[in-house]
Amino acid sequence: MDELVLHHYPTSPFSEKVRLVLGMKGMHWRSVMVPVMLPKPDVVALTGGYRRTPFMQIGADIYCDSALMCRVIDRIAPEPPLYPESTHGLAAIVAQWADQSFFWTAVPFTMQPAGVAHLFAGMPPEAVKAFGADRAAMSPGFRRAPLHDQAAHFHDYLGRLEHLLADDRPFLLGALPSIADFSAAQSIWFVRRAPPVAAHLEGYRRIDVWYARVTAFGHGTSEKMTSAEAIALARQTASFAPCGVDADAGLAAGTTVGVTPADYAHDEVVGKLVGLDTSEAVVERVDERAGTVHVHFPRVGFHVKAIKKDPP
């Protein structure tokens, strides 16, 4: 099997989630650094327009969204399990809450003026302004709550995590680590990058002990790879992960479709439908640099629709 390639950047919370999962699995992976904001020509060559970070590559198969990426990693390296049988359904539910509700509380709260001063220390004002404009374009409908409300929401969510750990269990759902731990830890990791905001974590002793245990998994071992090398890898790969379109999926194989995130960064990826079931959608694209690639998306959190135009 081709090596696993993670396209990420150091300060991305969802990238940290995946890096920790790779550490828990003890995996070796290739590391491609992507730009923090647009333009991202090498990213687009592989994904067809999906701009969120991270994404993962195995040969000419491109996996978007960390939820899907983690499921794929678990299939590749099933031990130790990321979805223990004893907590499988609950772990997925807690992870979804952490990836959405907790993330969209913790990250905006961290991006208050006191946090921004640390997160962007040393960057020229025009770069900070450009970053803000880039993220605003990704979430045009986002409404930031007043700071006192953000603080209240953040502490309420911290209280929930602390309560889960009230019996001093090692991980959120018991004796074994699961996807729930890594999804929740990414937001704590981001908050801790801004010391004035991280002060809000003081007093949550069990969270502190749990967080240290989760991050102790590390990131596995990685080897640097350039984006040009990743594009060449895709172009040189002639086979793809098995996939197919279910008979009752609602769309026929070969249909030209557009796939769009349901929540933010609504950049549409257009291609030929080659895989569709209740958990995953796969579109085939042809790029002049990357060749033929299969771009994979989870069904939850994405919209798939037939469109009347040729794929790029």
Image (tube, rainbow, N blue to C red):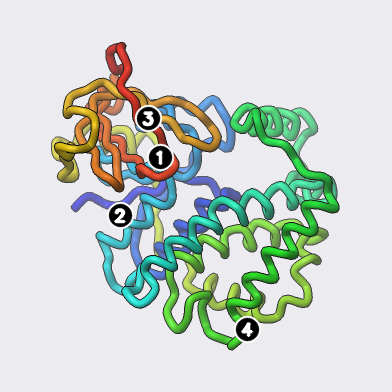
What is the crowding at mark 4: few (fewer than 14 residues within 10 Å), some, or many (at least 20)? few
**Residue corresponding to mark 3:** 259
**Residue corresponding to mark 2:** 72
| Disc on res. 114 | none
What is the crowding at mark 1: few (fewer than 14 residues within 10 Å), some, or many (at least 20)? some
| Circle 2/circle 1 CB separation < 8 Å | no
Q: Residue at x 59, y 31 (%)?
A: 138
**Residue corresponding to mark 4:** 166
Mark positioned earlier in the residue sequence (2 or 3): 2
* 205 or 163: nearer the viewer: 163
| Disc on res. 226 | 1
Q: Does residue 172 appear in this view?
A: yes
Q: Does residue 45 appear left or right of residue 276 in this picture?
A: right
Q: CA distance from mark 2 to mark 1?
A: 23 Å
Depicted 204 relative to depicted 122: above or below: below
| Circle 3/circle 4 CB separation < 8 Å | no
Q: Amino acid at mark 1?
A: Thr
Q: Amino acid at mark 2?
A: Val
Q: CA distance from mark 3 to mark 1?
A: 27 Å
Q: Does residue 224 appear left or right of residue 206 in this picture?
A: left
Q: Residue at x 68, y 33 (%)?
A: 131
- Of circles 2 and 1, the one toward us is 2
Mark positioned earlier in the residue sequence (4 or 1): 4
Q: Does residue 73 appear left or right of residue 118 in this picture?
A: left
Mark positioned earlier in the residue sequence (2 or 1): 2
Depicted 72 relative to depicted 125: above or below: below
* 46 or 144: nearer the viewer: 144
What is the crowding at mark 3: few (fewer than 14 residues within 10 Å), some, or many (at least 20)? many
Q: CA distance from mark 4 to mark 1?
A: 45 Å
